[in-house]
Image (spheres, coloured by chain):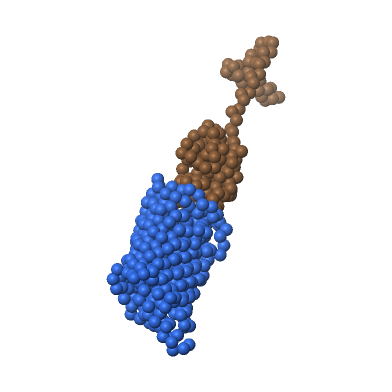
């Protein structure tokens, strides 16, 4: 019996010590002074998550051949964050030639005032070209041979 | 054949052999030769596309130094070497490029003829000694592939050996996936007066299939896939001395695809013996 009583006393002491310690850390409020419930803080609206926007296709074109040279496949103008690019897709293919540029033009017959994105990197398959803006001023994606000033193919951007 | 006709035919053959012109289907007599270095010039502001449309392009100019040589190996065999020793071409506002061109070697076998008519079979192999990559491939000096042709030719002497007509036709085989077709040529010539001879030339290339294909490339130079043309025009030969002659030719073209369209001028100096 004496042993049981001693054990119960020890338990009370331990419990009191523990609650006292918790009160000193301020972790659980005062156990001795229950008062009105603390005001519930107004729910802060969850911050609207900044959309992790993937690339957005602005316009697309399907190429058609011109002047007897073969060009086929699709191109898209893509906005990716603040950047824009022209993508020639997997199905793109054009006749092999030197001095072949990728251009955005107002008409199927490009002029020097149109946008030259540079020499084509591959005659087939997916490839990308940076744009300075969304290319809204241009109506056609054109595969242009600058040696003879002729389009190999073009696609209207819609 | 009567003796008189045989004699006339022999006379015509001798007369034609003495003409300061390429032999055509006539055999170059054994041990004799015909050599003609020449200069060719073309300026064109139009390009015939693979689809057959003729469109304006920046001026394309071509200068060529060519070398043509025939040698009689036997009474029936003639060997022919034909090469573009140097070729320079340019596109305005783009580039110019030059270099050695392609080389053709041909062997001609004269078939048994009849009277004034002669027949010959000529097999030619073209070696890609030129460079198809010049000028970003837009100004090549050669096709970049082996090519060959077998031409059956026929000729007839006219006006007692003072003139001739000849024609040839045969298949053309092109390597590297370029389309095959056939080649043809014809020539009518005759002595106008004294040392002056007048010619009319016609020659062409016609692919079996002219549908624009994947291998269509810009080829103002006329080396590309599906190149098609029928060139025609007059020529003039002036004998300067025995076995030495000056030859001038000019030709235009029709039925054109994948080649610059403009007149070509040729001047050559032939030496024959």
Above/below status of B52 relative to B155: above
Residue B243 locus on image (x, y percent)? 31, 73
The residue that appears at 44% across and 50% down in the rendered structure is B45
From this viewpoint, which residue is outermost toward the right?
A1
Q: Is residue B203 above or below residue A4?
A: below
x then y, percent, for residue B254: 50, 58
Q: Nearer the viewer, residue B159 or A99?
A: B159
From the viewer's side, name the closer residue of A74 and B202. Answer: B202
Task: Mark yes or no: residue B127 visible.
Answer: no
Residue drawn 43% across the image and 60% down it: B251
- Location of the C terminus of chain B by quadrant is bottom left
> Between residues A9 and A36, which one lies in front from this camera angle?
A36
| Along the viewing direction, whichever of B75 and A116 lies nearer the viewer | B75
Number of marks present in the image shown: 0
Vertical arrangement, residue A80 with respect to residue A28, above or below? below
Q: Quadrant of residue A155?
A: top right
Q: Residue at x 35, y 68 (%)?
A: B196
Q: Position of residue B247 (x, y in %)?
A: 35, 65
Q: Residue furthest left?
A: B241
Q: Colour of chain B?
A: blue
What is the x, y in percent for residue B41? 38, 57
**Chain with colour brown in the figure:** A
Furthest-bottom residue in view?
B3
Please state if B146 lies on the left or on the right of A94 as rendered: left
Q: Residue at x 52, y 67 (%)?
A: B182
* Residue A44 in sight from this viewpoint: yes
Looking at this rendering, what residue extends furthest in the front direction? B193
């Amino acid at each position: 019996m004496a042993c049981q009583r001693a054990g119960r006393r020890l338990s009370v002491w331990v419990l009191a010590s523990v609650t006292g310690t918790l009160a000193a850390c301020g972790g659980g409020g005062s156990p001795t002074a229950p008062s009105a419930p603390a005001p519930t803080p107004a729910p802060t609206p969850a911050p609207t998550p900044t959309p992790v926007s993937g690339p957005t296709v602005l316009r697309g074109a399907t190429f058609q051949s011109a002047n007897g040279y073969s060009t086929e496949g699709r191109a898209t103008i893509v906005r990716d964050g603040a950047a824009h690019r022209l993508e020639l897709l997997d199905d793109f293919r054009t006749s092999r030639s030197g001095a072949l540029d990728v251009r955005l033009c107002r008409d199927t017959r490009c002029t020097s005032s149109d946008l030259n994105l540079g020499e084509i990197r591959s005659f087939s398959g997916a490839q990308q070209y940076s744009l300075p803006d969304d290319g809204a001023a241009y109506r056609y994606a054109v595969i242009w041979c600058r040696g003879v000033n002729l389009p190999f193919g073009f696609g209207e951007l819609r | 054949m009567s003796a008189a006709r045989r004699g006339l035919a022999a006379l015509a053959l001798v007369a034609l052999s003495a003409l300061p012109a390429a032999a055509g289907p006539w055999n170059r007599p054994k041990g004799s030769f015909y050599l003609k270095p020449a200069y060719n010039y073309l300026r064109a502001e139009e390009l015939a596309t693979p689809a057959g449309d003729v469109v304006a392009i920046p001026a394309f100019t071509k200068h060529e130094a060519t070398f043509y040589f025939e040698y009689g190996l036997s009474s029936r065999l003639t060997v022919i070497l034909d090469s573009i020793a140097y070729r320079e071409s340019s596109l305005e506002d783009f580039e110019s490029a030059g270099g050695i061109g392609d080389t053709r070697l041909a062997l001609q076998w004269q078939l048994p003829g009849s009277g004034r008519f002669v027949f010959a079979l000529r097999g030619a192999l073209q070696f890609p000694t030129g460079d198809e990559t010049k000028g970003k491939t837009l100004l090549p000096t050669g096709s970049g592939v082996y090519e060959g042709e077998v031409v059956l030719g026929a000729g007839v002497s006219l006006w007692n050996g003072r003139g001739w007509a000849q024609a040839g036709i045969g298949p053309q085989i092109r390597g590297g996936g370029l389309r095959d077709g056939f080649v043809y040529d014809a020539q009518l010539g005759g002595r106008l007066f004294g040392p002056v001879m007048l010619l009319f030339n016609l020659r062409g290339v016609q692919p079996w299939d002219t549908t624009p294909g994947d291998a269509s490339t810009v080829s103002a130079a006329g080396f590309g896939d599906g190149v098609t043309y029928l060139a025609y025009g007059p020529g003039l030969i002036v004998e300067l001395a025995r076995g030495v002659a000056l030859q001038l030719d000019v030709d235009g073209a029709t039925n054109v695809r994948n080649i610059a369209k403009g007149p070509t001028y040729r001047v050559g100096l032939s030496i024959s013996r």
